[in-house]
Amino acid sequence: MKKALYCFLALLFTPPMLASEMPLNMTQGVTEISGQVYNLHMIILYICCAIGILVFGVMIYSMINHRKSKGAIAANFHESTKVEIAWTVVPFIILILMAIPATKTLIAMEDPSDADITIKVTGSQWKWHYSYFDEDIEFYSLLSTPREQIDGTEAKGENYLLEVDNPLVLPINKKVRFLMTSEDVIHSWWVPAFAVKKDANPGFINEAWTRIDKTGTYRGQCAELCGKDHGFMPIVVEAVSEADFDTWLVEQKSKASSAAAEAQAALSKTLSMDELMTQGEQVYMANCAACHQPNGAGLPGVFPSLIGSPLIKGAVKGHVDIVLNGKTGTAMQAFAKQLTATEIAAVVTYERNAWGNDSGDTVQAADISSASPASATPSEPEAAVPVTLPEIEEAAAEVVEEVKAVVLDDLTMDELMAMGEKVYMTSCVACHQAAGTGLPGAFPSLVNSPVITGPVTGHLDMVIKGKPGTAMQAFGAQLTPQEIAAVITYERNAWGNNTGDMVQAADVNQHGQ
């Protein structure tokens, strides 16, 4: 019996003793904080193992020595004050013992003060942008795994989906402060070796920090579901010595100067159609194919097709403008800072002539430079003219009256449906889906919904004020009365709802009063 008991205890103690050697256990990382997190993890593991040994030891002892075959008779008692005090006080003491080191570690993790270097990390679908404060260095970091490996036509590499074109370079033995934000949806910057995992939220700045102890290459990923290419958003950090970091800074500044000179020289060059198409395809596959697909067909209801698109077939100026400046309220990013004038000219030319578009248009770097707002020559500022408070109030009143006149105009059913679809695809589609079917169990379907087919006043109330306790937001302050009227009209007549109801901006304005 004793031998069996010894074997059982050995089985229980062996895993925590060898935990640091186990490949599935948490790693110690390469920073002081990651070491503290690892030690905290092991302390909690040992406490859990001790509790398990004690509880199961008592159970096994009781089953062996108080079994019926030995003639044991169970005690018959109710309510023991001592037992109740014991099972309340003992767990409380255990929790306190666990909370003390956990609190110390959490406080240390949230202290980015006295940093030597500050880096702004901006997430976007689906890339990272790094900006070194006080160094005038910034760059984008994109997945560099070849498309052939992703499509399965080539064997997967050693760092499949964990390799980038421009890694983040950091010095060791320096405190680095990260400022996290996002341009579109929520992302999360996570490098396990640093014990850093912080959400990047649009419109907010979150802070984190690290101090790396060892040189090397450390990899991570976006840890927040951020869209269809969430799995193609890796993080690579190159930790180098302080001397090597200083050398890298000089090289980056030199490269930036050379790139600026090359970009300026490129403005006087005229590329042939073949040269533009070849370069444009490369730029498109690296920056645009994730959304619009390699064949330009897009994803219906999410990303528009570029095949025969009105934008592609329309004026070149409009096409260049949307590539340069993006489109507010959509996933279309501004590429003015991400690509050179030559690259933008090439990709616009490619899109206008690929997949059967065949417009014949060629765009040169000089055309992009002249279209960019940065190329405009600033005019001399005019002398300030004193303005009195009554004049300001009068001007403000005129603006309000003009807005009311525009916002409260009645629109036709076709106009409401066209505008409503745009508003829906911008503000509602993330939850209720492009086909209005919602997500069962999470977001309700709008197809034949009681709210949609019921009284218009209830529908208005829901959109304007939201619904407490649910994910339905109040859009009264986010959308204009005309936009609310349009989206409600659209929802009540799309996807086979066909109520025939028309809502005008005046109805929304009146309902909100």
Image: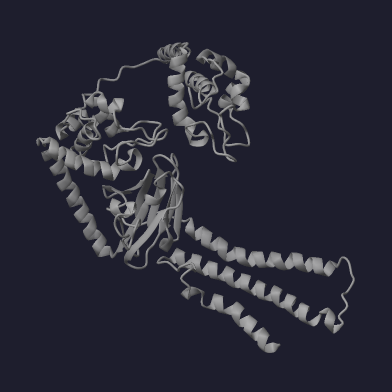
| Residue 477 appears in the rendering | yes
At 60% from the left edge and 82% from the top edge, which residue is drawn?
A: 10
Is 487 positioned to the left or the right of 167 in the image?
right
Rendered image coloring scheme = one colour
Residue 426: image x %, image y %? 44, 30
At 28% from the left edge and 48% from the top edge, which residue is drawn?
A: 139
Up-down relation of residue 511 to residue 105 (above or below): above
Choose between 431 and 180: the one closer to the eye: 431
Choose between 8 and 244: the one closer to the eye: 8
Q: Quadrant of the C terminus?
A: top right
Is 465 positioned to the left or the right of 294 in the image?
right
Write down the quadrant of residue 371 in the picture.
Answer: top left
Up-down relation of residue 269 to residue 19 (above or below): above
Up-down relation of residue 291 to residue 88 (above or below): above
| Residue 513 appears in the rendering | no
Q: How many marks?
A: 0
Q: Quadrant of the N terminus?
A: bottom right
At 58% from the left edge and 70% from the top edge, which residue is drawn?
A: 45
Up-down relation of residue 44 to residue 287 (above or below): below
Residue 98: image x %, image y %? 61, 66
Choose between 199 and 444: the one closer to the eye: 444
Write down the quadrant of residue 31 in the picture.
Answer: bottom left
Residue 8: image x %, image y %? 64, 81
Residue 291: image x %, image y %? 35, 40
Is 362 positioned to the left or the right of 105 in the image?
left
At 48% from the left edge and 74% from the top edge, which residue is drawn?
A: 20
